Amino acid sequence: MALYDELGGAPAISAALDRFYPKILGDPLLAPYFDGVDMVHLKTMAEAFLAMAFEGPQEYHGAGLRAVHERPRHQGMGDAEFDRFMAHFGATLRELGVPDHNIQRVAAIAEGARADVLGR
């Protein structure tokens, strides 16, 4: 079964992002990277991207990870920020009762994207 379906599909991804973004915006290390970002648009794009990344509907039509993260990289984003971001996402999934094996699958997918996000 696709990870997207195991996580609960679109409603689950939306609920996770609703809990996740306040954590990010409240984190002094990460919040500055979101200054001036349209969070409604970001959530819409993230929902489509995560659906695609988790083997669900392929409806993401935005830029690639390398391009999307160019601005934060120029602002100094690196491994510490990536790790903190993922820690918040993992915590969010745990709060929502996602089983550890699926959190590990999400983490593996994210880790596979680290180089693109960080421009390596």
Image: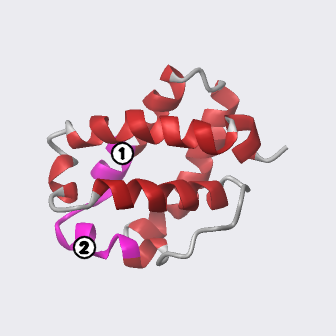
Q: Residue furthest right?
A: 1
Disc 2, disc 1: CB below 8 Å? no
Circle 1: residue type: Phe
* Position in image of residue 22 (x %, y %): 29, 37
Secondary structure mostly seen in magenta is helix
The residue singled out by tag 2 in the image is: 71
Q: Is residue 35 above or below residue 108?
A: below
Circle 2: residue type: Arg
Mark 2 Cα within 10 Å, few/some/many (few <14, many 20+)? few
The residue singled out by tag 1 in the image is: 85
Q: Where does the N terminus fall, quadrant-wise?
A: top right
Q: In the figure, residue 112 lies in which quadrant?
A: bottom right
Q: Is residue 36 above or below residue 29?
A: below
In the image: residue 50, left or right of residue 117: right
Residue appearing at x 20%, y 38% in the figure: 27
Q: Is 39 covered by the magenta stretch?
A: no
Q: In the figure, residue 73 lies in which quadrant?
A: bottom left
Q: Is residue 13 visible?
A: yes
**Tag 1, which secondary structure?**
helix
Residue appearing at x 45%, y 30% in the figure: 92
* Position in image of residue 37 (x %, y %): 23, 61
Residue 18 got which mark? none
Q: Is residue 95 above or below residue 47?
A: above
* Position in image of residue 108 (x %, y %): 61, 48
* Position in image of residue 98 (x %, y %): 62, 26
Q: Is 75 covered by the magenta stretch?
A: yes
Q: Is residue 27 above or below residue 97?
A: below
Q: Is residue 88 visible?
A: no
Residue appearing at x 71%, y 60% in the figure: 57
Say whether disc 2 or disc 1 marks the residue closer to the N-terminus: 2
Which residues, given as a range, are shown in magenta? Answer: 68-85
Residue appearing at x 60%, y 39% in the figure: 11
